[in-house]
Image: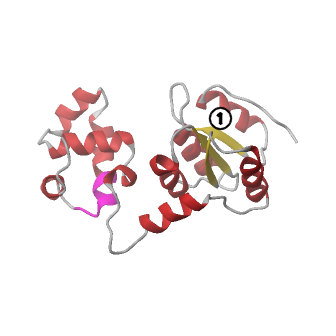
Amino acid sequence: MQISEASSVDEALELIMQDNYNLIFTDISMPGRSGFDLLLQVKKEYPATPVLMFSMHGEDQFAVRALQLGASGYITKSCNSVELLLAVKKILAGKKYISASVSELLVESISVDRPQPIEILLSKRELEVFKLIASGRSITEISKILVLGINTISTYRLRILGKMKLQTNAELMRYAFEQNIDL
């Protein structure tokens, strides 16, 4: 069994391309791109390779999102060694690992009578674009503010509308107003 360590997403992707790994263990907070970027890339190119997210961020912040994006498990850095070993063993056996508190969060996130909080539904960048659209900014203005291409902003807009099951910017603006979202 080979064990490797990477200090960035790009370095991790290089290692993953060179060898087959039974498990990828990644932090969310990494220099440059985030562990979520690594997770998405791994799930796209190596869908059978399990990814265990390990973070200082509490489960209530990122666990559900990590699992929705394809992670095989999520644990915090405050977990004890027994829980870490249990998570690794379970994932290597082809199963998912979630703690009892993440299990509760997942049940809450799929509850049909309760809408998902926008912070869980959208990525950090999508949330930024959402707020700018909801404040009445045009795609061109948003691209200048975020220093991203117009096509990139348009793609984010489409993703946001799809995730939120909305059709137009007007519906998005109405949603922000009705939910009292700070813009």
Q: Residue furthest bottom?
A: 112
118 horizontally vs 82: left or right? left
Q: Which residues are magenta?
A: 159-166
Q: Quadrant of residue 130?
A: top left
> What colouring method underlies this structural image?
secondary structure
- The residue that disc 1 covers is 13
Q: Residue furthest right?
A: 1
Residue lying at 27% horizontally and 56% vertically, measured from the top left = 161
Across and down, in percent, residue 59 comes to 52, 49
The C terminus is located in which quarter? Answer: top left
Nearest the viewer among 146 and 117 is 117
Residue 147 vertical position relative to residue 160 in the rendered view, above or below: above
87 horizontally vs 143: left or right? right
Crowd around label 1: few <14 · some 14–19 · many ≥20 (10 Å): some
Q: Total marks drawn?
A: 1
Residue 117 vertical position relative to residue 21 in the rendered view, above or below: below
Residue lying at 37% horizontally and 74% vertically, measured from the top left = 112
User: Circle 1 sits in a helix, a strand or a loop, which is it?
Assistant: helix
Across and down, in percent, residue 2 comes to 85, 38
Across and down, in percent, residue 67 comes to 55, 56
Q: What secondary structure characterizes most of the magenta part?
A: helix
Residue 32 vertical position relative to residue 131 in the rendered view, above or below: above
Identify residue type, mark 1.
Answer: Leu
Across and down, in percent, residue 43 comes to 60, 51
Residue lying at 55% horizontally and 63% vertically, measured from the top left = 103
Check residue 174 for magenta coloring. Answer: no
Residue lying at 69% horizontally and 28% vertically, measured from the top left = 6
The N terminus is located in which quarter? Answer: top right
